[in-house]
Amino acid sequence: MAKRVVPEAGRRRRRPTKQGQVLTHRLIVETALRMLREHGAAGLTARRLGLALGADASTVYRYFRGMDDLILAIADELFGHAMADWRSTGDWRADLRDLGLRIHHAYQAHPQAAVLTASRVTGRPNEVASDETILGVLRGAGFPDADAVRIYHAFIDQSLAFAILDAATLALPRAAREADEEVWRDTYARLPRDTHPHIAATAPLLVARMNDSAYPTALDMLLSSASAQLKRPAPGE
């Protein structure tokens, strides 16, 4: 049977931790994010989280039904980071580009958390607010509902897919990440033209680009496709 979660008001009446802090849902989530950043997914346990908070491990379960519930809360917090202070410009394409880059940046700021959470669907307030905003931008631009949902689907999946891909690179040990980056210069750039003419012809460009995220380019391609669709006349017009 799921553990009972104590309402927020009830939690705040509890005495401070050994560190003098009164525990809150947000404090636990932010501490978990810090632990993921410093120790990775293997380092996030209820016991270690309790130690970091100066509280007993069982205290965490007054706020969350289990560690998976905490993971979903972390996922929602990242959407909250992405949407913080966002304002519409009235230009649908500029707004969607900004939203996509914000989501990607929020996950890259917490790569260990991104790998753990980007594939999850939380249905929680920040995620729901993000989805409402994206769909609102698309519908406000004049896309029919079926097209708005189709583009939204591609937009959010692209954002999260690149978030996982790029976060996985950032989450690698530094030596492994640097070794991977060197492959483009030490292997691809040295391939002979007679056996690999296309790689040899583009080697300087590959070396310059391939260690950077392709997300901004992919995002612009998706938005260009959507923009072209919006400008096409509907059947019968």
Image: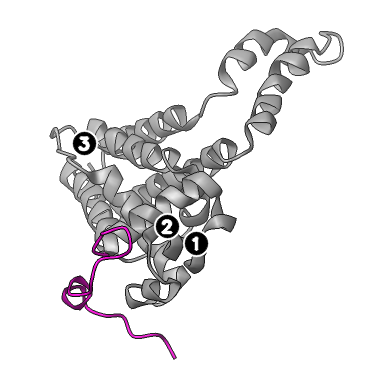
* Image coordinates for residue 63, horizontal then vertical, percent: 32, 73
Q: Residue at x 86, y 9 (%)?
A: 194
Q: Is residue 194 magenta?
A: no
* Image coordinates for residue 206, horizontal then vertical, percent: 63, 16
Check the image and report above or below for 4 versus 124: below
Tell me if label 1 and label 2 are in contact, CB under 8 Å. yes
Residue farthest along the bottom direction in this orientation = 1
Three-letter code, disc 1: Arg
Q: CA distance from mark 2 to mark 3?
A: 43 Å
Left or right for 233, reference 67: left
Q: Main secondary structure of the magenta part?
A: loop
**Tag of residue 48:** 1
Q: Residues within 10 Å of mark 1 (few under 14, many from 20)?
A: some
Left or right for 188, reference 218: right
Residue named by callout 3: 92
Residue named by callout 2: 52
* Image coordinates for residue 161, horizontal then vertical, percent: 50, 46
Check the image and report above or below for 99 versus 180: below
Three-letter code, disc 2: Ala
